[in-house]
Every structure is written in structure tokens, then in C-alpha cells.
Image: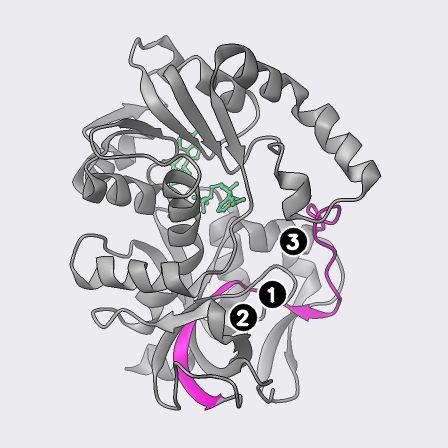
Amino acid sequence: MQAWMLERYGDPQQVVSLRDVGSPAPGREEVHVRIDAASINPIDLKLAQGALRSVQRLALPICLGFDAAGEVRACGDAVSRFRPGDRVFLRSDRATLGAFAEAGCFREDWVAAAPQSCDAGEAASLPLVGLTVVQGLRERAGLQSGQSLLVHAGSGGVGTFAVQYARMMGIRVTATCSRRNAEFVESLGAEKVICYDEQDYRSLSDRYDCVFDMLGEAHTLAAFDLLRPGGSVVSIAGPPDRQFADQVGAGWLLRQAIAFKSRPVWRRAESGGYRYFRYLTEPHAGQLGEIAGWVDAGDIRPVIDSRFAFADLKQALARCASGRARGKVVVQSAEMAAT
Ligand SMILES: NC(=O)c1ccc[n+]([C@@H]2O[C@H](COP(=O)([O-])OP(=O)(O)OC[C@H]3O[C@@H](n4cnc5c(N)ncnc54)[C@H](OP(=O)(O)O)[C@@H]3O)[C@@H](O)[C@H]2O)c1
């Protein structure tokens, strides 16, 4: 079978190549999945570049990719929820990856039944962004119906899911995006859109119970100025929070580096009585099952920017790297493209 392998760290266009690799056999707790579609996430590019080496050292060469959808072909002895022929979607973990391949073996507890209303490309677009929203806005910030939320980059992969999740939960959501995406983001459920190419969100007097920060840098500190008393900043691009070092199993030196980098944000949060969360997303079959239910109920729809053939993965990576995708970039197998 074929897989897109990362040979060494560097420019993804140079260091990722299509290779013939051995066909995997599932371990006791694994399912062997024929991958019909996968989706790209910005972290795929960061891992390839080696930008996350300090928190996630990869065993190279490795097949990249977190998000996949396809059909179960075989199950390990201890697998209880699946049988060959089941349609599934999954989110792999940071050490295993493996979605940019024709097939792979994944732990059962990373896998769920795919939404019935989706094709494989749509199903593959959901796992990482959906889990990121659930693990940030629900598990950490505990956002409730009636509260208010600002979602940055509401037109991106995470943002399009976050806006729809908030609307579904009765959370009043404002989003930032460019003028060209404003109508689209409103159609997903944003009550208000702030077009970053026309207006600086920092100049407005609106205040929120939570800011979901996809932008990082100065935007992370600026988020605290937008909060109501007791509010939260949930960031997936800013400096680490106090739990992050435990999440990545950091040693002493990395803990010192994290504390040095994060101190201004931690101080801002603590002096203002705010909460700050900066986390990495983890696989979670149960949450994937919930996401499938929301999609099948019509509460959340997959948003696909573009689809590429599996053989054109590098074009898909380039589209994601452009930072201009509206929703998710998907690659799909030749068989699926033909249907
Ligand atoms: N747990 C985690 O650590 C975690 C999980 C998921 C993602 N992330 C990170 O979160 C970030 C976002 O991920 P993503 O998948 O949503 O990225 P993405 O899909 O590539 O985001 C692209 C979108 O961002 C919008 N955008 C760009 N600059 C903007 C600005 N200044 N203000 C508002 N919108 C802007 C673009 O809209 P225009 O084309 O209109 O500009 C585009 O629609 C990435 O850095 C990713 O690595 C972290």
C-alpha cells in the first residue's frame, strides 16, 4: 500500500513523499481501516517543519495525518465496537499519526462510527476540529447556553465548527473573518461578524464570557481586554497554560521555557481574575460519537474548502498553508473520487 511519509523535518513540499510501505496488521486493541479520505490540519505542516519538536518528537520516517474516514477491514482480538465493513471516522494521536495513507491501524478508542449523512470526505473533515471545539469550549471553559463567545477566524477549519457548535448550544456568538467570508460565517450562525479587513475588533466595546483565540501572538493578550468579569480565554495558538507541560510530559528544561514564554499571559489572567486555557487536542471516540450525532441531526454541517486526490496531497498541503481555506481541505482516494 502507499503512504505519504515524512522523511526528515523541513519544507513539507520537499520532505514529504509517497512511498510503498508494508500493509499493517491490527494489534489487539486496534482496527485496520481502509482510508477513503483524510483531511489536512495546520498542525500537519508544523509537525513536518519540526516546529513542534520540543513537545512532540516524531519517530521518522512517519506517515503524517490525524484525520481519516473509511471502512473497517479487520479488528484486533480485544476490539468490541466494530466489525469489518463498518464505516468509521477517527482522529489519530500525535505520536502515531498515519492518516495520509491508503490504510492504517488505529486504537479502537480513537475511532467512532462515521456520520451516516456524510461521504468519507465530509466525515474526515470533522474529527480534529470538532474535538478541539468540544475539548476547549465545553470541557475547559464550560460554556453554557445564554453566554457570549467571540470566535476568531470564524471561516477556518476550527472556526466554522466552533460557530456552529455555539449556535447549537444556544451560545451567542460573534466571529472575526474577512469581508469576503462575512455572509458565509453569518449563515453558520454568527449573530455578528467583525470583518478584520475593515475594522479592528479591539476598538469595539463588546465584551464576552469567552474568547476562542486561533490567532495567537498579540491577539492572545488582547483577548483579556474583551472579557466580562470571570471570563475565559481558550487559545489554540497562544503560549502554553499551566497544565500544558503535564499534557506533553515536559522535562525540567521545557517547563522552564514554557513558564518564561507564558508568564505575561498567566499574569494577565491571574491579575484580572480570568481563566486561561491553551491545550493540545486529544483523540476521543466518545466525543467523536457525539459529533456524528450532531451532524446527522443537521445541527452541524461539514464545511469543505476543497478536495484533492490522494496523489495530490502536496497541493492539499499548500492550500492549507495558504491560510485562506474556508473550512477544511480534504484528500480522497481515487476510488472515492470516481464515484
Ligand atoms: N489544540 C490545538 O492546539 C489546535 C487544534 C486545532 C488548530 N490549532 C491551530 O489553530 C489555528 C487555526 O486552525 P484552523 O484549522 O482553523 O486554521 P485554518 O483553517 O487554516 O484557518 C484559515 C482561516 O483563518 C482566517 N484568518 C486568517 N487570518 C485571520 C485574521 N487575522 N482574523 C480572522 N480570521 C483570519 C482565514 O480567513 P480569510 O481567508 O478570510 O483571511 C481562513 O478562513 C492554527 O494555528 C492551528 O494550528 C491548534
Which residue carries the number 3 mark?
Answer: 47
- Residue carrying label 2: 100
The mark that comes first in sequence, 1 or 3, is: 3
Residue 130: x %, y % from top left? 37, 52
Amino acid at dot 3:
Leu
Residue at 39% over, 27% down: 211
Tell me, yes or no, if residue 200 can be seen here: no
Q: Tell me the colour scheme of the image.
A: one colour
Q: Is residue 236 on the magenta stretch?
A: no
Disc 1 + disc 3, Cβ < 8 Å? yes
| Residue 315 x, y percent position in the rendering | 50, 60
Q: Is residue 288 left or right of residue 92?
A: left
What secondary structure do most residues of the magenta stretch adopt? loop
Type of residue at label 1?
Answer: Leu
Which residue corresponds to the image point at 50% horizontal and 22% vertical from the top-left? 219
Mark-to-mark CA distance, 3 and 2: 14 Å
Question: Which label's residue is closer to the chain start, 3 or 2?
Answer: 3
Q: What range of the chain is rendered magenta? A: 50-74
Find the distance from the CA under tag 1 to the CA under tag 3: 8 Å
Q: Are the residues at dot 3 and dot 2 in contact (C-beta closer than 8 Å)?
A: no
Q: CA distance from mark 2 to mark 1?
A: 6 Å
- What residue would you read off at disc 1? 64
Q: Vertically, is 27 above or below 209? A: below
Mark 2: amino acid: Phe
